[in-house]
Amino acid sequence: MDKQARELVRKRAGGVCEYCRISGEFFHLQFQVEHIIAKKHRGGDEDSNLAFSCDRWK
């Protein structure tokens, strides 16, 4: 996954975790872009299968 795809997902999410909706502005958690359906389960790299998530979700 390239930097451009990660930035697109972050902007789509509005800078908040797409699972718990916590904002990176108020909590200094590390955020990442992850696959909703894992690649090992045949999930792809398309935008619709990527989520902006915080470490609290794990």
Image (cartoon, rainbow, N blue to C red):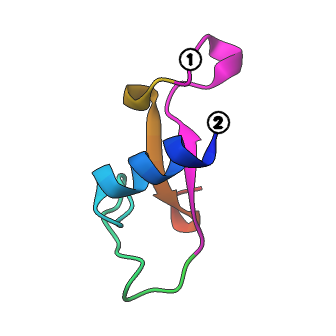
Q: Are marks 2 and 1 in contact (CB under 8 Å)?
A: no
In the rendered structure, the answer to whether residue 55 lies left or right of residue 16 reads right
Crowd class of label 2 (few under 14; some 14 to 19; many from 20; radius 10 Å): few
Which of the marked residues, 2 or 1, is nearer the chain's N terminus? 2
Could you tell whether 32 is left or right of 20 in the image? right
Q: Pinpoint residue 6: horizontal percent, then vertical percent.
A: 53, 48
In the picture, the disc for residue 11 is none
Residue depicted at x 60% and y 72%: 30
**Magenta-span inclusion, residue 49:** no
Q: Nearer the viewer, residue 39 or 20?
A: 39
* Relative image position of residue 22 (x, y in whole percent): 35, 72
Q: Amino acid at mark 1?
A: Gly
Question: Dot 1: few (<14), some (14–19), or many (≥20) neighbours within 10 Å?
Answer: few
**Along the line of sight, the residue nearer the viewer: 8 or 54:** 8
Residue at label 1?
A: 43
Query: Mark 2 belongs to which amino acid?
Result: Met
Which residue is under mark 2?
A: 1
Magenta residue span: 30-45
